[in-house]
Amino acid sequence: MFSTILEQIVNGIVTGSVYAIVAVGMTMIFGVLRAINFAHGEYYMLGTFGAWFSIDYLGLSYEASIVVGVLSTIVVAYVVGKLVMQRMVGAPAESGVLATLGIALVLQNTVILVFGGGYKFFSGGYIEPVSILGFSLAQQRILILVVCLLVFVGLELMVTYSRMGKSMRAVSQNVDCCEVVGIDVPQVVLRTFILGAALAALSGVLTAPVNVSVYGGMGELITFKTLPIIIMGGLGNVRGTFFAAMILGIAESLVATYVGLQFRDTVGFATLILMLMWRPHGLFSTQARF
Amino acid sequence: MKYTSSRRAFCISSAILSLAAVVPGLPGLAQAADETIKLGIVAPMSGPNARYGAFSMRGAELAVKDINAVGGVDGRKIELFNADSQGTPVEGVSATRRLIDEDEVNYIIGDVSSSVTLAMQPVAEDAGVLLLNAASSNPKITYGAGVGGYKWTFRNYPTDENRAFVVAKYAAEQRGFSKFAVLSVDSDYGRSAIEFTKKYLPEFKGEILSEDYYKEGEVDFRSVLAKIRDNGAQAIIMYGLADTTPIVARQMVEIGLAGKVTLVGNGEFNTEKTIKSAPTALEGAVEAAAWLPAFDSPESKAFVEKFTTEYNEAPNNHAYVHWDTVNLLAKAIHEAGSADREKVRDALSKIKYKSPVGDVTFDDHNQARLPMILLQIENGKPSVKGAYTADIQYPAQ
């Protein structure tokens, strides 16, 4: 009994790690733009497709495909960032919703047009199971967990000490003052956006071996899973996002085991409703920042 | 000023373009009305079931190509239209309406998903368009057809009831399983197959230890598989989606279920790609399908060969049933001696059609009498264990 619960908690932490890497990008983009990026899951999908393409068509190894997947997403994110995201600085909230939903449709359907709507089989990765604590786990899942921790330590350091991190925080606090003191706001927005998209792509490439299938619509589900996480974490809060992702991952895993798999997706949405009713500013902030 | 002139230019050019599109189309339309047979295919061309849609369309295209190559059905060529249901009832209904209202088709073959087909039935009925289903297995579709209500719905596919019975019987009697776990897709297909499994399982002294349904697009089965590992089930009854089978099989290997628990049910366990994804998990798997490439009849083998040369890929069940159903429709039109919908419908209910899996006739619920083919994966290859036909017990009206 105890070992089953432990196993499910570990499963949940692995799932949570995937969500966390995607969600942290979304929350940082919210921080600088005050807009929820509804196209965020599409960058997760693009990264996975880039990796799948480089393995199936170019014959590259899985390690190389991670690089290709992330780099190709960065290129797309640069174009979208220049053409769309930079124009959203100071724009009303609805334009952000419309623009990012539009981008989501364009990216998703372009991929479906080019590669077809069917599921693709992702063959790379380290899927051999290893045994720890009395149950078995694919090596890839351990890799996901390690990468997630590294990403969060890195981001924490960057946000606290680097110039880019400081300017990101500044932009998220007051755009007008940033302009007064000479911070290039559009530049900060673009860089944050590219970083967020690249992290989503990385998460996609890391998850692909255990999820096996790759298809055009796969990003949508991730967007809707990360939405409750960033709200729970407190919009724009990097550390809060990490814990919120873990909570959701573990809760989903326990619900799937003890209530039923069909109720798994309910957890995220139910959490979202509860959060919006009682703590719209998130679990980890004492008051609403926005 | 600059904007006004470019807008005017846009208006004029688009007006010219639309005229150009309409004018040559006019004589074509008049000709099409009496000579071609307009056939619409509703299938999931995008979304989680897109693979089924692509195969369905290719199967239908191959049949149409062959029929048109020999001059069509008594001189009438078949023109094929395609509409995407995305595998959801809402989109399926609007796809059906598009085919009927815009493309003005007389015949529709569709959909793969039972939930979508159930939603399409009243639409086809209202329009008086013949709906031939080729790939949905929920029994309700023909419970409500023919004498059951919908006069324009026919189904050329065996039902879940037949399938559930065949699988339960084989798993219990031939394999000696008595403890089962359920892991099926949360749809009219997955749920009804389990409903009928529960009806027949007690006859074979089988019991169900756990029951889970997954949403289309689900990718994480570790929690459920761990539960199954711990509850001691000998087999997992899975009526699932083909694209999900490799994911489940891979995670069975990961969690240490491969070789210990057997998959039984349906979900394209037998394709080369699926078996390759996790050979140890699929070894011994039992599946009941309407058709599979390994089926041994000369017509079936000829189809596999033709399809493979055309598309460089072996056909699946959905390619076959759509190919077969187009041929069935052509035969019905030929026997009716006219492309009049009502005459074709009457011809269909009296038809004796020789399909590659056996002779097909329709009962008073417009349901084809067809066998389910049972197979088992042995040494990484599907091996056919027999074809079973069971009579359907319709519920009292």
Image: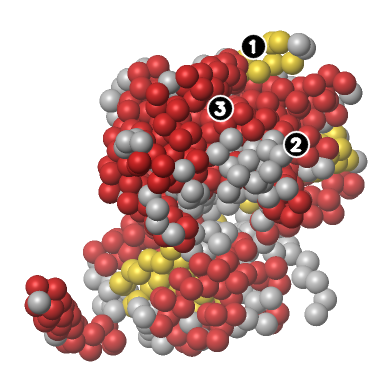
Specify the amino acid type for callout 1: Val
Instruction: Report helix, strand or loop for mark 3.
Output: helix
Q: Which of marks 2 and 3 is in front?
A: 2
Q: Quadrant of residue B254?
A: top right
10 Å crowding of disc 2: few (<14), some (14-19), many (20+):
many
Q: Which of marks 2 and 1 is nearer the N terminus?
A: 1
Image location of residue A220, percent across then percent down: 51, 48
Residue matched to label 1: A130
Which residue is drawn at the image coordinates 55% and 39% (left, top)?
A236
The residue singled out by tag 2 in the image is A251
**In which quadrant of the rendered image does the N terminus of chain A lie?**
top right
Residue annotated with mark 3: A210
Q: Which element is circle 2 on?
A: helix
Closer to us: A18 or A272? A272
Which circle's residue, 2 or 3, is located before the other in the chain? 3
> Disc 2 is attached to a residue of which chain?
A
